[in-house]
Image: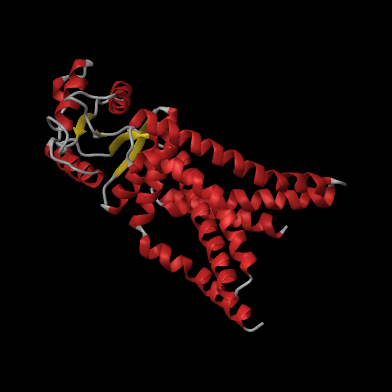
Amino acid sequence: MGMLLLAAVAALLYMRWRSRDRRMLRNGVALCAAVGCGALGLLQLLGQLVPGFGFVTLGLLLLLPASVVVLCGFLVANGVTMLRREGRRLSNMLSLLAGIALAVLPVLGLRLVLFQEPWSIALAVLLFFASAYVGVSFLVFLSYAWVYGRSTRHEHPAAVVVLGSRIIDGRVPPLLRARLDRAIEVHRETEPKPLLIPSGGQGPDESRPEGEAMAEHLLASGVPAADVVPEPRALNTAQNLEYSRRIQVEAGRDGTLLAVTNTYHVLRAALLARRAGLRAEVTGAPTARYFIPSAFLREFVAVMKGHLFLHAVLFLPFLAATGLVLVAALGR
């Protein structure tokens, strides 16, 4: 019953925090804790009430190594697809690197243990803690990104900012077109009609600002010119949101700002909006399936980098535990 009680406490925390602000990653921590503790508590309860259910639990545990092998294969295959379709850039290699790491880390940990030296045992323990911490953190990020992305589908904004991405030969590629089409959908469904702000500056490999190309697509799709104001200066997501908010205020369209991006980018954009103190939510547009694993990994890395100090503090207990293991091994 202890696990079920913890699950109930975590669920209450999730509902309380989410009611205050959906754009907080700690909501995902509480949600995953509630689901995880609830599942463990249910397994314990069934083990007590149903004869032989322990074998089912054992079978589930034995499936974990097999699932890791399947995940490794999927990530490697996806990484090869990314390299073939998107080119040889580091950001396109993330799923391939993650798959290789999942395969190599258990072998490396086992080799360190087999050395049977105090330093190697401590290093193996540290490697286990670091891998578990990153894995759980990614699970929290991925789970809450999915949940949050489905909680903003019925917003009624005063303005919609379409976050820019790279244009090719001055034209809108499919990835960016999906964001624009989602903004058009929101515009058609919302009364009174929101202001559409296609936002994006000109990158070093672009022939013109993204905002201008995006505005042309909106107008060609039938959106009235009075409802389209491009923002052609922003060079990152934070600037997209900040500059678009200024345009919204100057246009007299005060109210909620809804940002449109692709599904993998939704949660990080929401976190940036909250950090900037903006009254803004984020919704997602469809993304090609093969692109999603690497894209989510890239977003996760960016979120981790943005909270390095917090993660360093949270990891301190694991460093302390590793130190205790080293002291115990030296004292043998």
Q: Position of residue 258 (x, y in %)?
A: 29, 36
- The reply to whether residue 15 is in sight is no
- The reply to whether residue 78 is in sight is yes
Q: In the image, what residue occupies the spot 20% across and 45% down?
A: 239
Give the quadrant of the N terminus.
Answer: bottom right
* Side of 1 relative to 235 (left or right): right
Q: In the image, what residue occupies the spot 54% across and 68% down?
A: 123
Q: Position of residue 80 (x, y in %)?
A: 44, 33
Q: Quadrant of residue 161?
A: top left
Q: Quadrant of residue 81?
A: top left
* Side of 311 relative to 42 (left or right): left
Q: Residue furthest right?
A: 51
Q: In the image, what residue occupies the spot 57% across and 77% down?
A: 326
* Side of 315 relative to 197 (left or right): right
Q: Position of residue 199 (x, y in %)?
A: 19, 35
In this rendered view, identify the residue nearer to me: 206 or 165: 206
Q: In the image, what residue occupies the spot 35% across and 46% down?
A: 268
In this rendered view, identify the residue nearer to me: 116 or 98: 116
In this rendered view, identify the residue nearer to me: 218 or 69: 69
Give the quadrant of the C terminus.
Answer: bottom right
* Side of 271 relative to 326 (left or right): left
